[in-house]
Amino acid sequence: MKGISVKNLLGVKYLSKDDINLIFDTADSFKEILNRKIKKVPTLTGITIANLFFENSTRTKLSFELAEKRLSADVINFSKTGSSISKGETLIDTVNNILAMKVDIIIIRHPSPGVAEFLTRNTNSCIINAGDGTHEHPTQGLLDTYSITEKLGTVDNKRILILGDILHSRVALSNIFALKILGAKIKVCGPKSLIPKFINNLDVSYESNLDNGLAWCDAVNILRVQNERMNETYFPSLREYHNLYGVKMSSIKKLRKKILILHPGPINRGVEITSEVLDNKKTIVLDQVENGVAIRMAVLYLLATKRKDLTDFN
Ligand code: CP
């Protein structure tokens, strides 16, 4: 079997259509295992994985850890709080010290765009990007695209609306790359101030009106307003943001068709989506979370298989 073409997962932009299809096919097999009574396989026995989180996370951190444990890897966790970073240790020194403990794979979440790529150039390890600032969050882009594929059969020629704070989102770029590679049509929607100027270069168009965007799409992926990354005011108030770009039941009821509603989380209830839409099971948010474990198992398995130095099961 032809394996994945990359040695690290730095971004979806480095993946081919064959890579993404291989990840999805592999995730299908792992999803089947995750629905068994005994959800564990010995695939990564003997491999040690370090999860390095320099930013807060619930879904990605737990999902990677669970994926690693389901594959029988040995797992260690690092968070910035309580580490020797506060004593002035550099990132490269931190990672090289962790690698000296015979760690094979590094998962890293960090606020700085490009940090995963920086580590591939300055350390000798297999690196998986778990979200680098406003740049990419490849496993999230993959699991969102996988979840849409699972529900609609394909994303080829499907119309996907990405709604909200595109400017500060790493999920937006990874979704755009994955969806485009698989043939989807994409529009972004939100306040113009939260749309990056380079968006047209990605063959993605802009829709300013939420109701028009919802009427156009087969699926909408709603992104969180990332207040923690904003150093200035991008819209007058959260109330006005919600009035114009919050997904409400009134907008959903106006549609003469069913659309898929996704959100990668965490969710600001009452800002980008109302509790009424969320709690009426109008969304596939928890399907996304479930699929995240299978997608991360697939990525770990395919990268470990690629690195013949790590495994002898190739
Ligand atoms: N979707 C996502 O990245 O969530 P966390 O920040 O909780 O990991």
Image (spheres, helix red, strand yellow):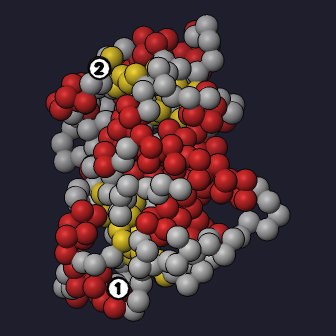
Above or below for 151 versus 125: above
- Foreground pick, 60 / 127: 127
Q: Position of residue 15 (x, y in %)?
A: 36, 47
- The three-letter code of the residue at mark 1 reads Leu
In the rendered structure, find residue 206 and report the number of the disc placed on it: 2
In the rendered structure, find residue 99 and report the number of the disc placed on it: 1
Above or below for 36 versus 244: below
Number of labelled discs? 2
Observer able to see residue 265: no
- Foreground pick, 311 / 168: 311
Residue at 33% across, 17% down: 207
Q: CA distance from mark 1 to mark 2?
A: 44 Å
Q: Earlier in the sequence, mark 1 or mark 2?
A: 1
Q: Position of residue 258 (x, y in %)?
A: 63, 18
- The three-letter code of the residue at mark 2 reads Tyr
Name the image quarter holding residue 124: bottom left
Name the image quarter holding residue 180: top left
Residue at 51% across, 28% down: 155
